[in-house]
Amino acid sequence: MAEKLSHVKRMEVPAETIRQHNLEEVATAVSENKESILKGIDLLESLNQSETLDMLTALVKHREDALANVMRELNKPEYAAPVENVTKLFQIAVKLDVDEMRYVADRMNHAVKEATASEATGKTSYMDLLKALKDPEINRSITMMLQFLRGMGKA
């Protein structure tokens, strides 16, 4: 009959073998991510040259003090209205339809380019305004502005 096991001896991996395995793993990761690592080094160098890295390091090390100072400043009465306005601005931004706003902004940018490219000379008479209404582009723009004003005025 076999003897009972009273002591199990674990196989120990030498520290040098573990270290060698870790180095190989790191070398493989560096090789696979060479471009990202080089970009990261370039970013760190840029931050260091502009002395932003020192500022960020100090900010992280003393984050509690920095946050306390920011909160103390924001709690001053002269900053109450701007902070409240920023909150309201975010609430408004959430409600906006971005696709519709993009369309309107694109049209406004196009209109600004056209206006700056044209040479406005002389005065515009009432008859000129009436004649301009026959232009389909002007008529479409005026109709759009009237719809905008109508929509804004609805309760």
Image (cartoon, rainbow, N blue to C red):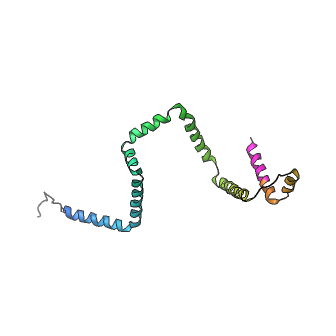
Classify residue 152 as left or right of residue 127: left
Where is residue 105 drawn, in percent x and y?
A: 67, 54
Q: Relative to the observer, which residue lies in front, 35 or 78?
A: 78
Q: Quadrant of residue 27?
A: bottom left
Is 109 magenta? The answer is no
Looking at the rendering, in which quadrant would you find the C terminus?
top right
Q: In screen coordinates, is 74 left or right of 24? A: right
| Residue at the (41%, 60%) spot, across then down | 42
Q: Residue at x 46, y 38 (%)?
A: 70
Q: Quadrant of the N terminus?
A: bottom left
Quick one: 60 or 115, which is closer to the camera? 115
The magenta segment is: 142-155
Q: Main secondary structure of the magenta part?
A: helix
Whole-percent x, y for residue 52 in the image: 42, 50
Residue 72 x/y as whole percent = 46, 34
Q: Residue at x 79, y 59 (%)?
A: 137
In the rendered view, tell whether residue 33 sits above or below residue 48: below
Image spot of residue 33 (x, y percent): 39, 66
Identify the residue shown where x is 54% and y is 35%.
Answer: 79
The single residue placed furthest to the right in the displayed view is 127
